[in-house]
Image (cartoon, grey):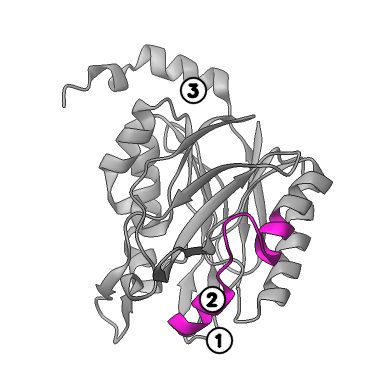
Amino acid sequence: MTVAAIQMTSGAEVAGNLAAARRLLAQAAAAGAQVAVLPENFALMARRDIERRAAAEPHGDGPIQAMLAAVARELGMWVVGGTVPLQLPGETRVAAASLVYDAAGREVARYDKIHLFDVDVPGRSESHRESSGIRPGHEVVTVDTPVGRLGLAVCYDMRFPELFRRMSAEGATWFTLPSAFTVPTGRAHWEVLLRARAVENLCGVVAAAQSGFHPNGRETWGDSLIVDHWGGVLARLPRGEGVVTAAFDREAQDAARQAFPALAHRVL
């Protein structure tokens, strides 16, 4: 089953970002993808929390969600909508929601990013406080797709293996990780963390990334990856905008899980 990771350099204008996402999703469909994954913040790399709040949509309505549903339906392809800023009743902060649409354009899953990036980046005068504008989620989310049962995570979540164990216990056979990784942490940890989450759970991983310089002053690492259940890198896009695809081999994954039953050996 073929999956796609879409890499973008999103800016501060929602309309332009949506046009770029639509074009890249069409490329993924033309390459035969059954499911395509957009990066974190694909519709907006906000310069300030106020811009994120202004762009936030009610769940189920708004131009970002309408585009995702329409493109999924038009292309006959499942779409994992990176993260979308969604309004929260009685809350000035927003949810960073990863929304999944089936090939008929119906939303079938929503995951609100649990772990928020409140850090000072080592080696740089770069600080992030996601919790100032985003409210963390609390629910682990998995959903059946044509590629197998999918576990949803976002960016900083990859540093918390217990989340992936929970999704694996719910039957996940692959994970998506839309991301906007910093350059220092990307250089040091991006690939090793993604491959570790794949290996320890015998699951595939699709990590769709932001790449390059953004109007908000950030530089993101890029290097979108598709990793198989054995930790092998099937496809990658180091820098720039584009699409990479790869096919997960479910028979090989099932055989590996039977011959190497590490998941059944868990005692904690």
Per the image, label 2 sits on a secondary structure element best described as: loop
Mark closer to the chain start, 2 or 1 = 2
Q: What residue type is labelled 3?
A: Gln
Percent x, y of residue 145: 60, 32
Q: 10 Å neighbourhood of mark 1: few (<14), some, or many (≥20)?
A: some
Q: 10 Å neighbourhood of mark 2: few (<14), some, or many (≥20)?
A: many
Of residues 49 and 250, the one nearer the viewer is 49
Percent x, y of residue 177: 47, 51
Per the image, label 1 sits on a secondary structure element best described as: loop
CB under 8 Å between callouts 3 and 1?
no
Side of 191 where 52 appears, left or right? right
Q: Is residue 60 magenta?
A: yes
- Tell me which residue sits at (40%, 55%) in the image: 113
Q: How far apart are marks 3 and 1 (CA)?
A: 41 Å
Q: What residue type is labelled 1?
A: Pro
CB under 8 Å between callouts 2 and 1?
yes
Instruction: Identify the residue under disc 3.
Output: 253
Magenta stretch: give its range. Answer: 48-68
- Tell me which residue sits at (40%, 12%) in the image: 258
Q: 10 Å neighbourhood of mark 3: few (<14), some, or many (≥20)?
A: some
Mark closer to the chain start, 3 or 1 = 1
